[in-house]
Amino acid sequence: MLCIDELKDIVTDTLVMQFAEQFIVTDFLEIVGEVYATTNDAHTDIRMMLVNAAASQMDALVGRGDFKRLMEEHGEFSSALVITMHSIYCPEPSVEGAVDSSKQEHKSL
């Protein structure tokens, strides 16, 4: 008999394969909503798989009202997606030109 963790792994692997073969936006958004509504922070594997899938499909998602609503309703998903997208497009912090605001002098105009 499979334990719950093994079942979660099977579901996660199955979804990864399905999204790679065919990404249907409406189905994806429904799955994200269900997973985030019925799981917690302890279920990081399936949640991060969904975040990574969203990050790889941003062209299909951005601009859709249903995606915007999902982002508004599920802040944990939204924040994880923003962090993931940042790590993709800004993998290392830029030292050149960085400003430490705590050391800036504030001058009155």
Image: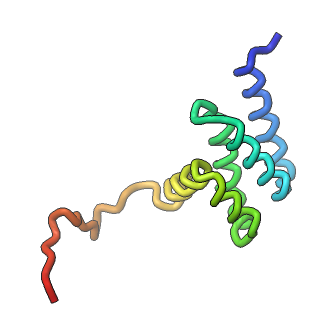
**Quadrant location, the C terminus:** bottom left
Q: Residue at x 46, y 60 (%)?
A: 90
Q: Residue at x 79, y 14 (%)?
A: 2
Q: Is residue 105 left or right of residue 2?
A: left
The residue positioned farthest toward the top in the image shown: 1
Q: Position of residue 67 (x, y in %)?
A: 72, 62
Number of callouts in the render? 0
- Name the foreground residue: 67 vs 20: 67
- Quadrant housing residue 36: top right
Q: Residue at x 74, y 48 (%)?
A: 33
The residue positioned farthest toward the bottom in the image shown: 109
- Colour style of the rendered protein structure: rainbow
- Quadrant housing residue 29: bottom right
Q: Residue at x 58, y 53 (%)?
A: 75
- Quadrant housing residue 40: top right
**Quadrant location, the N terminus:** top right
Q: Is residue 2 above or below residue 56?
A: above
Q: Is residue 83 above or below residue 42?
A: below
Q: Position of residue 64 (x, y in %)?
A: 75, 69
Q: Is residue 42 left or right of residue 70?
A: left
Q: Is residue 31 left or right of residue 79?
A: right
- Name the foreground residue: 79 vs 100: 79
Q: Position of residue 108 (x, y in %)?
A: 14, 84
